[in-house]
Amino acid sequence: MKIWIAACVFACSLPCSAQEKVDTSVREIILVFKSHLDVGYSDYAEGVLQKYTGGNVVDALDLIDKTGKRFVWTTPGWEMKEMLERAQPGTKIRLEAALRSGNLALNALPFNIETEACDPEMLVRGLGVSSALSREYGLPLPRDAKQTDVPSHSWILPTLLTNAGVRFLHIGCNYSSGPPEVPLLFWWEGPDGSRLMTMYYAPAYGTQLLPTVGWPFKTWLALMVKNDNEPPPSQKELDALIARAHRLAPNARIRIGRISDFYDDIMKEHPSLPVVRGDMPDTWIHGYMSMPREVKGSRNTSRDLFAWESLDALSSLWMRRTRDITGALSGAYLNDLLFDEHTFGLSMSYKQNGVWGYGDAFKLNRAEGMYDDIERSWHEKGDREFDAEKIVVPSMKRQMQQLALNIDVSGKRILVYNELPWSRDGVVTVKESSPGSAVKDLRTGEVIPVSNEDNIIRFTAKNVPPMGYACYTLQAENATPAHDNMRIDTATASIENNYVVVRFDTAHGCIRSILDKKTGSDMVDTTQGYGFGQYLYERYSKKDADDYCLAYSKPYGTHPSDAEFARPFLPEGAHVSVAGGAARMFFSRDAAGLHASMMISKPHDYVITVTLPEDSTGIELTWSINGKPADPWPEAGWLCFPFNVKQPVFKLGRLGAIVDPSKGFIKGSNMDYGFLNTGMAVLDSGDQGFGLCSPEAPGISLGTPGLWKYSREFGSRKPVVFVNLYNNLWGTNFTEWVEGSWSVRMKLWRVGAFDNERSIITPSAEFRSPLRAVLVEGPKGPLPASAPGIRLSMKGVMVTAFGQNPDGNGTLLRLWEEAGRSGKCTVQLPAGFTSAQFCDLRGEPVSKPFPLVNGQMELAIEANRPLSIILK
């Protein structure tokens, strides 16, 4: 994303008195050249790719030839992949030659990623773009990585990159964004203890030509990054820059190279660097919730990809057949990861996509087609997720149907698949029409009642094997529940089971109480000024915009109501908040439990449904909105959860680790808003409290709604969690108005003695990955009614990959410890494997092969660290 500055060759090498001062101490300057890739912003994403293929790369190749192959241009992996696939035959030959000679240098990452929006495995698959190209052209895998523009990143990066063999990361901050408070060069220590040499340059995308004041080393990285999608330098610009470097650093050797060259040289100086251990929440991440439906889809698709890959691999073992899905799978992974690339569409601030208007002016402008191009560019971005979804959803269903048709039972049967590596119970939903009032568990003969109406069959499946399946048949007989402890009281607007009473406040559209019958304690705090589960709608003011820009932007970058970070030309007016409203109540019951729905019509038509399962002390909540109108005025929607906890301590399931934000967030990063990857807990001084998981709306604020706020430190917070349902507060780079109909679901539960695994990781995983089911009809097959897949003895360890090795031969199994606990883990594999070999995250072997005994492995698991294994 470009912040408008004076025209220059390289923003980071503008002349100034400090830079013009001669430096006689530096002995080595490594010049690195690249252009900042925005997949959009300055044009449609497709237009950007055409520019790189038809112009930028040709300019780079010409400069390589003119300089006698001294010029080196660094690119991310996906950019190079697209240029190779799109280039004309003659250009492709030159591209391949420059790639092999090292004049085109790949960095390890595919593009600039908003890491906080990803899942761990999605980031790993992204590394495969550059590594696949490197292997194809006989090159060593890149040991350097570059992130540009996005100011701060998830703590998983040092874990991810170090465990992939990458040794150096450069982060170049957006010209105007407030940066986190970190040194220029440091060891960034991940939650697993991995240390990655990291250079964080706060002023701009790259670095300056000469070392910064006080630089203690003899080697300097002069990383010259052109602005958004601009071509490489001309011969004249390059010669002038090199001449200037020689003049200002007369004792230095000046050479053009790649980023990892700096790492190699600086390590020869045996640098003593500070160690930074902590998470850097992204100050841009709220922009993702300008596409709430696509965020929901992306989060679900990420799990669907793993489920499809793992079930395909297991089915191949169970059914003794081989099928290659690697092409379709890698394409779906890449499309979903492209949704996590940091650019969302055309920019209004480029002054070629209409002008800002509010109220009637916006409606008239839109009616005249003023915003057609920018809206199409947002659809181009959103289609990344839909392109992945339309591959994986039907593929997963077909895979389950094929497996179900091979079960040793004739006629109709329901196959239930559990993608998690432990046995579990869960409610199963089958969207089919078929008669039957019960199902029979073919393992035990137990007859289980079902709800069967409106073409939806639901029942509770018990003890489904780890990463395995169980089979059921529909029955005409009635099954009587073992006990009926569920009650609906319409007079008091309440529902209850043996453990909990949930009471509703229909006047304010919220939950009045969630009372634990045994202890008498209530989940709800009614004194915080917000209703529990209440919808809060906010419309922001010009003062809100001005205050945020002045707090967040660098002093030399922007001005109040900036067109990039906020909203220009806002009329004066007050901040408006609307909380809840009068609700109409509806109650129902099915196999999932009791349902209580509040239907509310202002300020929007929305429904809040609370589900109370039969055997649970917690609840599930679904919020849905119908026909929200488009509005460019800065606005946001939240669900409020004031928890009954004194002196709260927060534990957040972030990407890479569970973090206490009061201790684990680096100062200057985002203290006011962030994405959860798993779940969270709000605890009292006795480590008791409540848990929350919101996989489809992952953005949360703690204590107060945190949009257009920038607190450089966390401080003390009230025990209120705000789940962000949508917002349009970015003035560029993200979608500028939100409209339509969608829904999100979340789960809340009680926490006894807090434990990372029991209190966050396991309940969040089970909610995010419900049991999957399919109904088929056909003759009997050869497979048993139930079979396990992969079983792990250690909870908190997730299987993030199991399938055909994307980096070579064999089957890849990847484990990732998420609860922050090291230990010994027994892995029981399905039959068919005889040997194993450890590898890194890019498939490079890190051990010799070793034999398996009865399909078992005893593994040493390190806290928050991935472990990859090639099985044969």
Image: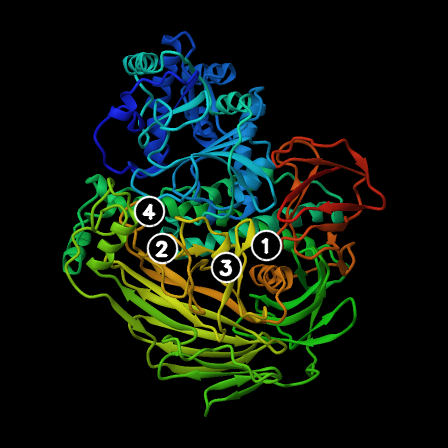
Quadrant into which the N terminus falls: top left
Q: Identify the residue shown where x is 63% and y is 63%.
A: 755
Amino acid type shown at disc 4: Trp
Which quadrant holds residue 12?
Answer: top left
Identify which residue, 358 or 152, lies in the foreground: 152
- The circle on residue 711 is 2
Above or below, comparing residue 60 to residue 762 in the picture:
above
Residue density around tag 2, few if under 14, some if 14–19, many if 20 or more, within 10 Å: some
Asked if the residues shown at circle 4 and circle 1 are in contact, with their CB atoms under 8 angstroms apart, the answer is no
Is tag 3's residue or tag 2's residue first in the polypeptide sequence?
3
Residue indicated by mark 3:
695
Residue indicated by mark 1:
397
Asked if the residues shown at circle 3 and circle 1 are in contact, with their CB atoms under 8 angstroms apart, the answer is no
Residue indicated by mark 4:
378
Is tag 3's residue or tag 1's residue first in the polypeptide sequence?
1
Amino acid type shown at disc 2: Ser
Amino acid type shown at disc 1: Lys
Gap in angstroms between the C-alphas marked 4 and 1:
29 Å
Q: Position of residue 507 (x, y in %)?
A: 35, 84
Gap in angstroms between the C-alphas marked 4 and 2:
30 Å
Task: Decide if residue 156 is on the left or right side of residue 566.
Answer: right
Q: Secondary structure at mark 1?
A: helix
Above or below, comparing residue 493 to residue 750 in the picture:
below
Residue density around tag 3, few if under 14, some if 14–19, many if 20 or more, within 10 Å: many
Q: Position of residue 17 (x, y in %)?
A: 24, 25
Gap in angstroms between the C-alphas marked 3 and 1:
22 Å
Amino acid type shown at disc 3: Pro
Task: Decide if residue 171 is on the left or right side of residue 324.
Answer: left
Identify which residue, 838 or 790, lies in the foreground: 838
